[in-house]
Amino acid sequence: MTLKMKNLALTLIVLAFALHAGAQGPKQLQISGVAPAATDSVLVIDMTRGAIRAKIPVRDGKFSTSIPAQENELLGIGDRTYFAPLFVDGTPVEVDLVAHRVKGSELNMMTNRCDNSLDSLDRVLAERMKTITENIADEAAARVQVAQLQEQRIVQRSEILKAYANTLVPAAFLPDMAMEMTYNQVEPWLKEGAPYMSHPRMFTAIRYAEGLKKKMPGLMFHELAMKDLDGNIRHLSEWCGKGNYVLVDFWASWCGPCRQEMPKVVESYVKYHGKGYEIVGVSFDTKEDAWKNAVKQMGMDWPQISDLKGWQSAGSDAYGVMAIPSNVLLDPEGRIIANDLRGDRLMGKLKEIYGF
């Protein structure tokens, strides 16, 4: 971790402690609103911890309550279809879960406007993606266009957020947005002194940025030594830097998104392995049988290694992996040229390399 990042992280740890153990004690957050028909309750979520703070009963489409909360704590209020992000700032809040509108302080109304703008952009781009996949017969060409739209989404979401850069608002969205961004896209947001950087939720974005920095394009691969499926110690250097493109793929048998993604990874192997493309799977499993069974079930016919340490895996630290599935693509010399290529982005990159 760089000195700058360490200072930011330490500051946020102190702020987090102050926020949740403040000497003045909790405030009372007044919440009221309307919910969609047939909704019997709405939830209050601590968005920093991802924990349920309260369950509010809904009667005749309306709800109202008062809950203890710390100043500037970020909460989400909603049902299964929509959650409104809110900062606790001492002003009562009215939430319309049907129209997706918030009335309250200027900060919370700005947060609501930003949230709705981001959602509107996502709906527009989702329709464009649907049109592409339904109307372009050339699957490879469709993948390229979808990948371009995904990149466009990241840029446009950042542009929307820039309008709120001098407020706390980015703290409500940046930690999640960072999961789809490159280091060079995240780093400019991590400015000491920016109002949103004082919020404890930003610690997640800082940690994620540090992880991205370890797998930036241009870096040489980091060596790993782990056991293969037969119990033999293998090194990444046996495959990486040997003249072929190599995808180092981080996954686990217990990871649902990894299983959803794996058919695309298998497809990439089947299509390009004959041209020299290789994959090395690095499992974050802890149970050997589960790891081996998943490899067979999903037809992963490429080298596999693991130290069976779960999130304590050496691969997590070496490559800054905070979420799986994750991957890095290496060039024939063993240098990272791309990371976190999923689905159409992976196939699009390989088409760019191999020409088909």
Image (cartoon, helix red, strand yellow):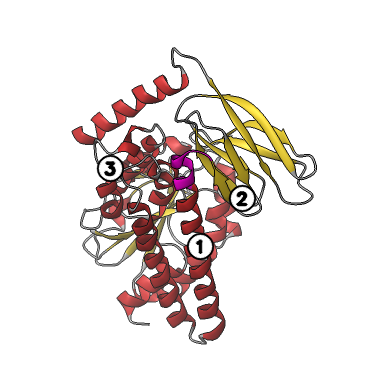
Measured along the vertical axis of the image, is residue 300 above or below residue 54? below
Which dot marks residue 120? 1
* Residue 49 sits inside the magenta stretch: no
Question: Element type at marker 3?
Answer: loop
Toward the viewer: 318 or 339? 339
Q: Earlier in the sequence, mark 1 or mark 3?
A: 1
Which range is magenta?
104-111
Residue receiving disc 2: 82
Circles 2, 1 touching at the beta carbon (< 8 Å)? no
Q: Residue furthest top?
A: 23
Residue type at tag 2: Tyr
Magenta: predominant secondary structure element? helix
Toward the viewer: 158 or 354? 158
Residue under the image location 37 percent in, 67 percent down: 152
Q: Earlier in the sequence, mark 2 or mark 1?
A: 2
Residue under the image location 44 percent in, 43 percent down: 172
Toward the viewer: 344 or 63? 63
Residue 300 visible to an observer of this rendering:
no
Cα distance between the residues tagged 1 and 3 = 26 Å
Residue receiving disc 3: 190
Residue under the image location 26 percent in, 54 percent down: 184
Residue under the image location 28 percent in, 67 percent down: 244
**Quarter the C terminus occupies:** bottom left
